[in-house]
Amino acid sequence: MGKCFKKGKGFWRSCACLGLVSAVLAAPVSAQAADSAVLRPSGTLLSIDEAVTNALKDSSEIKRALARLGKEEALYKGTLAEFFPKLKAAGEAGVATGDSRFLGYLDTGIEQPIFQGGKAVAEKRRQNAVYEVEKLRLEEEKLDLELAVRVLYTQVLEEKELTRIAQGEVKELTTECERIKKLSGKEVLPRLESFKIESHLESVKHSLVKHKETYDYLLTVLRETVGVGEGEALDLQIYGSIPEAADGLESFLDASREADPLYKEGSLKIQAKQYEKRSLQAERFPQLSLSTRWNSVRDVYVDTNRVIVGIEGKWNIWDFGRLGSKIRAKEKEIEETKWAEDIRIKEHEKEIRRLFHEARALRQKIRMTEAFLKENEESYKNEKTRLVTGGKGTGELLDSFIALEEARVASVQAISEYRIQIARLERTRAFKPAEIETPSEMNTADVEEDRS
């Protein structure tokens, strides 16, 4: 057996070595194929929908919500058991002093509730309402997690693009800085020009480091969220067209009332409180049960062995107002819950209105930044031409370059901010698909029409 184990061990070592050699030989080919974008082992980029799906599969928040749901389901099944008979048994055996040294007691029976004033039914319905609330909370956890992934995905793409812009700035400014240093050394240009571009170069380097570190941090968080290991290649899919909040505000409100679990959750909470009140009211009625018992007692003065069939009952006739006070307190609790849910819904719809109008403003901000970007691109080209022809100095070119890069950054940030706002808006209607339009397909006149 030891020989067979050694042979098997040697076989697996050979396979491992062969796999390692294959990976080393395939590395140049893989690096060349992933020159523009790093592909995942499946051969596709990680899209935002795939990121959401992966996050939902292995999320601690979802597992916690499932555990809560399982607890309430078990409690609901426990309330159903109250409708079935109960088997009871009690016994005692021992030795005592006196005339009869041995004594024994045994009492067994089956008890079937036949009337409890509706308490068992109320408890069952109350627990069912609580169970349904937990189901809705599970859906809310999923929606919140999807929103978090979509926001994180957008932020990673934003920092990646800002890093790329900063890299281009550093590269171009480094070349220009060396050229101006040479001209300053020859006293063709004043030294102030050299100091000015050097200080701006350091500022751009700081921006590059800041965006690169932020990108690395956010990408690590995204990896952990979607369950992608450190050894697995990961690249994100670049967004295509920009989603537009083209629907009217009322359509968002109607969709939210239909799809958002928040609305159903409130009514179920009120139902649970109402069933709690009904359970308290049931205690005013007598409780009757059909009972079948076998009773065996052996002691000094008694020696019985009998079967008892009958109806057992108990009734709390008067408790000096204790039960009535509990019922009135529960009525006030129901009223409090109703007003709390009303306030919660109003705040929710107020948030929808805020998100909608801010999204419309951010959409116009994207158009504004695009216009500024085009203007600064053309201005930078003109300044370059004037510098070559000797009509302008390096200071004007540097100012034009700074304005261009700031316009690029502003454009990226505006798009990212708008996408995050749209994701939050779509969360309010459970990420119901929205109309997709590019900014070029709409103009300011469309905005005025939508407002009217």
Image (cartoon, rainbow, N blue to C red):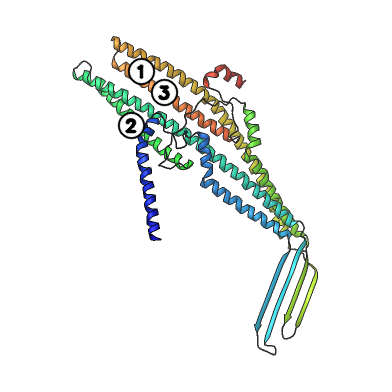
Residue 181: x, y in percent?
23, 21
Q: Which mark is residue 400?
A: 1
| CB under 8 Å between discs 1 and 2 | no
Query: Label 1: how many residues lie within 10 Å, few (<14), some (14-19) or many (20+)?
Result: many
- Work out whether mark 3 precedes mark 2 in sequence or the reverse, and give the earlier one: 2
Residue farthest along the left direction in this orientation: 186
Q: Residues within 10 Å of mark 3 (few under 14, many from 20)?
A: many
Q: Residue 206, which numbered label?
A: 2
Q: Residue at x 38, y 58 (%)?
A: 3
Q: Earlier in the sequence, mark 1 or mark 2?
A: 2
Q: Are marks 3 and 2 in contact (CB under 8 Å)?
A: no
Please state if 285 lies on the left or on the right of 72 as rendered.
Answer: right
Judged from the image, the secondary structure of the residue bearing numbered disc 3 is: helix
Element on which disc 2 rests? helix
Measuring from the top left, give residue 444's x and y in whole percent.
55, 17
| Amino acid type shown at disc 2 | His
Visible residue check, residue 192: no
Please provide percent x and percent y for residue 84: 73, 61
Mark sitting on residue 39: none
| Distance of label 3 from label 1 (alpha carbons) | 12 Å
